[in-house]
Image: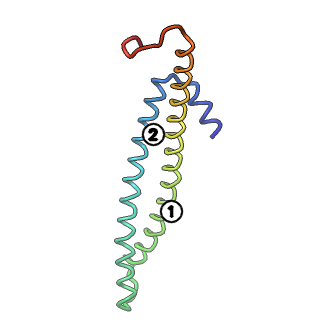
Amino acid sequence: MKLLYQKLNKLRTQDLIIQKMRYRRSTRLVGSLKTMAYAASALMAGHLFQTFADGLELTSFDVIAMVLVMWLFAIILMLEVEMARDLAGHELIQDLLVLRSQRLNLTVSKGSAPMTRGKQ
């Protein structure tokens, strides 16, 4: 996290805002992928449950479905880690922007005339 802070702190404010949008987009994409993985694993797990409940023998499709369900759960865990990383980066950028805004307000209030919106 410290390396991410150092990397982001070197960026200009405009670049920080752009990076924040990238993190937001990535978070939404990962969330969508996670939802699709949950849906696919639920469909396959439901099929497997029905097979076991009916007392039928496992077919080759059922074995493939079991393997796919395990892979999808592993993918979901990886997507959780990716989403947590993106959210941490997004929140770090928000904190940096707030700190920069507060620093700007402090330097302006020490000056003789306050800045207005038009003079930024």
For this orientation, the residue located farthest to the right is 2
Quarter of the image with the N terminus in it: top right
Is 106 above or below relative to 63? above
- The location of residue 55, given as percent across then percent down, is 38, 92
Quarter of the image with the C terminus in it: top left
Is 72 above or below relative to 88? below
Is 90 above or below relative to 114? below
Label 2 vs label 1, nearer the camera: 2
User: Which residue is found at the position 43% from the left and 77% from the top?
Assistant: 63
User: Which residue is found at the position 41% from the left and 73% from the top?
Assistant: 64
Instruction: Please give the residue where the numbered disc 2 appears in the rendered image.
Output: 23
Residue 61 sits in quarter: bottom left
Q: Amino acid at mark 2?
A: Tyr
Instruction: Please give the residue where the numbered disc 1 appears in the rendered image.
Output: 74
User: Which residue is found at the position 41% from the left and 14% from the top?
Assistant: 116
- The location of residue 112, given as percent across then percent down, is 53, 7
Residue 111's tag is: none
For this orientation, the residue located farthest to the bottom is 55
Q: Amino acid at mark 1?
A: Ala
Looking at the image, which is closer to me, 92 or 110? Answer: 110
**Sequence order check, earlier mark of 2 and 1:** 2
Q: Secondary structure at mark 2?
A: helix
Badge 2: residue crowd in 10 Å (few <14, some 14–19, many ≥20): many
* CB under 8 Å between discs 2 and 1: no
**Left or right: 62 with respect to 16?**
left
Q: Secondary structure at mark 1?
A: helix
User: Which residue is found at the position 45% from the left and 13% from the top?
Assistant: 115
